[in-house]
Amino acid sequence: MTTEYVSPEGLRLDGRRPHEMRHMHAVVGVVPSADGSALFHMGNTKVMAVVYGPHEVSNRTHQLHDRALVRCEYSMATFSTGERRRRGKTDRRSTELSLVIGQTMEAAIMTHLLPRTQIDIYVQVLQADGGTRAACINAASIALADAGIPMRDLVVSCAAGYLNSTPLLDLNYQEDSGGGPDLVVGYFPKLEKLSLLQMDSKVPIETFEKVLELATEGAKAVATFMREKLLENTKTLASARGHLKL
Amino acid sequence: MLSNKSFVRKTRHGKVVKVVREHYLRDDIACGALFCPTCDKSRAKLRDTALNIVVIDTNVALHQMDLLENEVMSDVVVLAVVLEEVKNKNLSIYNRLRTVIDNPLRHFFVFSNENHKDTYIKSLPTETPNDRNDRAIRVASQWYQHHLGAAKVLLLTNDNDNRRKAREDGIVAETVDSYVQTLGKPELLDLVARSDAMDVDVEDLRPNKKAVVYGEHKVMSEITAGLHNGRFHQGKLRVNRYNPFEAYVGSESVGEEILIHGRQDMNRAFDGDVVAVELLPQSSWVGSEVGKIADRDDEEEEEQVGLVPASADDAPREFKLEDGKKAAGRPTGRVVGIIKRNWRQYCGSIEPMKMPGGSGGTVQALFVSADRRIPKIRIQTRQIANLIDKRIMVSVDSWEPTSRYPNGHYVRTIGDIGDRATESDVLLIENDINSRPFSEAVLACLPPLPWSFSEEEHLKNHAHLKREDLRHIRIFSVDPPGCRDIDDALHCTPLPDGRFEVGVHIADVTNFVLPNLPLDVEASQRGTSVYMVERRIDMLPKPLTEDICSLRADVERLAFSCIWIMSSEAEIESVRFTKSVIKSCAALSYAEAQARMDDSRMMDGLTTDLRNMNRLAKIMRLRRIERGALTLASPEVKFEIDTETHDPLDVGMYQVREANMMVEEFMLAANMSVAGKILKEFPSCSLLRRHPEPTPQMFEPLLRTAAAVGVNLDISTSKALADSLDLAVGDDPYFNKLIRILATRCMTQAVYFCSGELSYPEYLHYGLAAPLYTHFTSPIRRYADVVVHRLLSAALGLSSLPEQLRDMPHLTSLSDNLNYRHRNAQMAGRASVELHTVIFFKKRPTDEEARIVKIRSNGFIVFIPKFGIEGPVYLVGKEAKGSSGSSNDGMWEVDDEHQIIRSTDGSRTFKVLNTVRIRIEVVEPQPNRQKLQLTLIM
């Protein structure tokens, strides 16, 4: 018998309903020495993002005269999964994720305002429980905002899948291993545009549309949460500088 | 609220990792009571009028399922923790429980206690998982009491400890027994399974009072360790259909089947149980001593007369007595533990017994199952007088080592013993065939009746189907006489250039059976129509089966057509598939079609078409045989049934005419063409049918028999086998057919499978010598064909493929079910024929010619061609066999190599394939167990 990812009572394995996300938690500015940093939790998936820049391009040959160079490095902590294993930064998965996250962030950053500079984004997964890709983009987005880098819009991300003929929002590791499709979107909430869409499996177009819609809805919810957190952070900063009386 | 569950788990590589999972606790989980003032009532089921809201614990669900299925149990709360435990322990009980829960009339409600913020509990440091779950059940019951008022909620548990603790917590708790007693329906008490916990209350625990009959089962941890270090072997136990004291465990670790000999070594395992087996020392392996017709005489059991096995799956197991292995024997073992039980409900009757004085008291009785592989089951009943001459259904509850027989309980009565309808029902139940009428929901999916074709509706409104109008073509159908579910029709139009346009038109069932509606779900579960001798159990409701889909003559019907252009030499030049509308001009029977072809005076168009088709079919058949297709023979019998009494009037072999072969040939061609098309479009999710190549071992019995009569068979390829079968001509005309019949039963059956699961060479259909094959031509009576219709329709771009059909695991489980249903339908059909054979011969003992097909040490097996039955003939009297136990008793000698049995004085000799005269009669050695007996006419 196949696993019941959604019980007939409408609950998922971890007690969520199909359209519910995991608990989110975000802390802005966790690494004071960096220009921007953030910690982002999506349930048990915990990700830290650190941003340096804009600064001078370290390797001159890579310098771009009309825009900023955005570099991203993704890694997983040795202790991020149940089985502790040293993970390289150059394996296929990490390279791919570095590129995906980097490109998604680059699309949001107004690079043309910062020519001949470099922006470094480091994302590290502290604990992995499915949906690391989305969590990394969200963390990086907050860190970029923290660093004060000009962006077109916040870029938010959320994943959705399809198991037991039900679209499920924000899959955890157990559901991710269920073999169904896992679709990740990057989304500009203000512009209402998608900047990233990834999925590795074949699904009928009707299903795809449902899952995509769900993922986008999820992304909007992430955006609301993220704005709240950033606003909260800005208020704290403002009051610290005496601009705002709390 | 959020909580984390963490536990440690071993990975495949043996590492221990800590797994942490989120566990969300909610405040929006409804209690499910319709009268609850606070909770959401959209899914509520528990009624205000109910006497009690009953909460059950896991063991009640596991052991008292028959009671729960009875409609007196309603307004029951099934906790999520209970469901989860049941699911892990016994999937079939879980499915039954789910069915009850899904039934809106039963008012069973699932309460997700594990995700409710007030009822979720963490296990205490010293608590075992079982104790924790018991506590969770108590906490949930308490919550219900608090939530709905204490008087209403009742916890049912047979566990004394749990009940005591519950009462301490102020929960009203009862045992199942006492609860059922309060319902005031004493007959229900028979449904209550007896459990140890209940016995403890009444029986004193005198140790060693009872003799231990069987060895103790090893505990699970020991079994796991034993399996790991290779001391034990795991596998599914299969009891020999022909000798219930012999069983086999197919073990991967040993590489061949382990033989289990005798009830003692089977150690309380039932057929189908997954068991752990320990090999016996090689010295006690069973060698050549096996092979007697009936083995033990501690219970009167022997081989039955029955229909001829149709394939290797039905045939009695044969030992491979190769010379080298003879001394060593076969790996023999004994069961040391049962990993997974396969208990189900069994049909049978009470063993005749002396009636105790007085009625109403509890009586112990022995139940004898209709399935010979099942041991007798001891049941307790208060209504013995009612049951003694009935066919009843019984469930097994337990089997203690101290008990010779398993304990069970009565489930329900089927009907009177000997009544044909009852016996038929028994066959259906035993083969897990759903013969209930279709439900309202299913019938609601039918199109409005009377249905008729409308141009507006089917040609214009559904233009995307590109349905072709083929009504002008001369299409006809050829079927068995009296066939009501006509799912195929044919046409054959000569083209001006000498070629032919040949079409096979199949009822367009998928136009009416839409995916995932109740009708479709029901059909996919039934899998196939079942043909019993006196009735037919349809896969689809009657209006579809006999009218709307049936391609009857002179009415317009929707079809799915496969149309070839063939050269005059029957080469397929092109093929196309299309949805169509046809109007059959004639529904012929095989005999009618044959008569038309044979009657040289008839020159009308239809007859010419028939003759053309027949000519093409013959060429195609020849070509197929050249490719290596086997012409196998399985004797099919046909009864002539009295329309009034439904008693069989006459029985005879089914006559195969050229017309039959003609239709068959085109059906095969259509199936092959469709298989190619759907596989091309859907390489990983096509439903195909394959026939695995038999292994040389499977041919062993055939080769031995053939060698004994001086025929040499080449089994290297199907082609070689087909050729050597053609050459195997004896001195009488039936000889060849007999060899073919023997060859047929060496093969396994063809099976459905999902193309993504296997690689291309494995798709082979051995018997047809076709690289690809599927079923397309009978969607009215087979669900596989419905699936293939959908695949083909999607392959043509006429419709989109339903989602489940793209899902490989789903398709695999679907094909497993279809194989299971298909096989059961065949078994039921055969059993039905056997039943009618007994009824037929009861009134008329008959002398008939028979052929010896196998020599055994105390007799031989004969096959009676005229009636298609096969059974043992004993040369050695039963008394003699019982007294000495040695095989020959000095009167008969067996020459195994030449398959000859001769009397020691040399006066009589029987050789395999010889003709003997046999008397067929019905005897009743035990009451209620009628059977056919074959005796040699000296």
Image (spheres, rainbow, N blue to C red):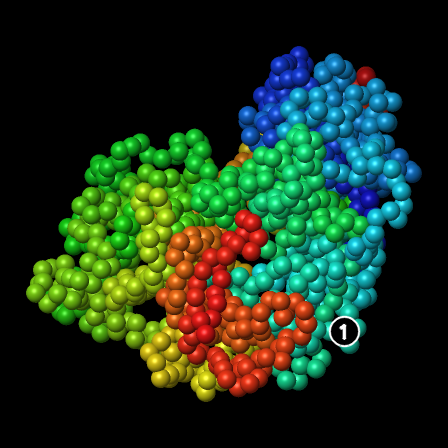
Return the residue nearer the eye: B470 or B624.
B624
Q: Position of residue A229 (x, y in %)?
A: 74, 29
**Which of the image's four quarters has the N terminus of chain B?**
top right
Residue B53 in the image: x percent, y percent? Answer: 69, 21
Asked if B290 appears above or below A11 in the picture, the reply is below
Residue position for label 1: B284
Q: Between B249 and A96, which is closer to the camera in this rendering?
A: B249
Q: Is residue B413 visible?
A: yes
Q: Residue at x 59, y 37 (%)?
A: B387
Q: Position of residue B67 (x, y in %)?
A: 65, 32
Pick out the residue farthest to the right.
Answer: B126
Q: Would residue A182 be found to the left or right of residue B734 on screen?
A: right
Pick the residue in front: B580 or B738: B738
The image position of residue B535, as x and y in percent, is: 38, 46
Q: Secondary structure at mark 1?
A: helix
Which quadrant of the figure contains the C terminus of chain B?
Answer: bottom left
Residue B426 falls left or right of residue A104: left
**Residue in the image at 40% along x and 80% along y:** B725
Q: Residue at x 70, y 65 (%)?
A: B261
Chain identity of mark 1:
B
**Left or right: where does residue B845 sit relative to residue A143?**
left
Residue type, numbered disc 1: Ser
* Quadrant housing residue B282: bottom right
How many marks overall? 1
Q: Is residue B626 above or below residue B13?
A: below
Residue placed furthest toward the top:
B37
Residue B249 visible to an observer of this rendering:
no
Relative to B700, is A224 on the left or the right?
right
Residue under the point 84% across and 23% down:
B167
Between residue B451 and residue B897, name the one nearer to us: B897
Label 1 packing within 10 angstroms: few (<14), some (14-19), many (20+): some
